[in-house]
Amino acid sequence: MRRFLGLMMFICLLFSGNCFAMQFSQPVQIGAFGQFPNQGFTFYYGTIINSGVYFDENDEEKGYKKGIARMGDGKDALYFHYDLDKDIFKFGDKDIKNTIDRKYFVYNVYKINTDAEIVIYPINPPLMYTFIAKMPNGKFIKYIDTEEITKKYFKYENIEDISYGDLKVQDNILTMRYFRKDKNLHEDEFFEGKIYLKWNDEKQNFDVIIDGKEFVKRLSV
């Protein structure tokens, strides 16, 4: 009986207020690119290159070392400013002053539309996410990232001990699966669970809700 009541309380907390919450579309991928060792960036999905400079002027296959990549079209386009020599990795507007720093070397980029004229861009290096957004006034901001979730909610210092994936929209809430290492598990085992990112109008950011139901999984060879 207690378990049933606890489950009902969790469901009420999770889905309360959905009728008034910001509405999300399903994530749509708009870009994918990465940098291989001793090479520049290679853009291989959904990306248009603007004013790119080759990593090696004698070998185009080594990618780009500096430039601006555009993902998407029109007012919802997202720009990636990069300069390997100056260690610049910024997402946001065509104007570099209106961008968010996010340094990794492999990226999958998605777009989520909302009914509040806010466009959310989940940036997905392997096994983690950063959620940035373009506000109605055109300003780019960062909402939350999984590094913060790992440290604040799981109390893990090493961000590599928890990985994230399978981003979806469920009943106007963003959901992700997480995969958590634990000292009590074998090296090839991990805990799998689910996280809900529920929009909070008052905070103008996401509340993080951890499902609490974990399953032990083993890596398949």
Image (spheres, rainbow, N blue to C red):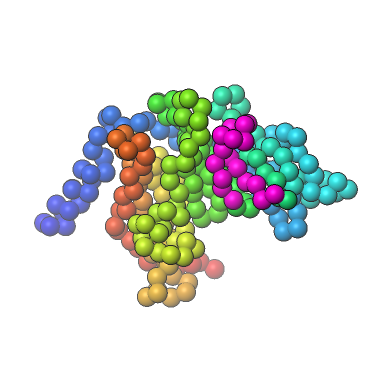
**Quadrant showing the C terminus:** bottom right
**Quadrant showing the N terminus:** bottom left
Quadrant in the rendering for residue 31: top right
Report the residue at 40% width, 70% height from top.
182
Residue 104 on image: x %, y %: 60, 52
Residue nearest the viewer, comparing 182 with 78: 78
Q: Is residue 121 toward the left or the right of residue 39 in the image?
A: left
Q: Is residue 149 toward the left or the right of residue 100 in the image?
A: left
Quadrant in the rendering for residue 72: top right
Most extreme residue toward the right, as rendered? 58
Quadrant in the rendering for residue 98: top right
Task: Please provide the residue range marked out in magenta.
Answer: 86-103
Tally the numbered discs: 0
Magenta residue check for 11:
no
Q: Is residue 162 toward the left or the right of residue 103 in the image?
A: left
Residue 113 on image: x %, y %: 46, 30
Report the residue at 55% width, 28% height from top.
76
Residue nearest the viewer, comparing 181 with 147: 147
Report the residue at 75% width, 39% height from top.
52
Most extreme residue toward the left, as rendered? 1
Magenta residue check for 96:
yes
Residue 219 on image: x %, y %: 48, 67
Q: Is residue 71 visible?
A: no
Residue nearest the viewer, comparing 150 with 99: 99
Q: Is residue 73 visible?
A: yes
Residue 114 on image: x %, y %: 42, 29
Report the residue at 75% width, 54% height from top.
39
Q: Is residue 212 toward the left or the right of residue 159 in the image?
A: left
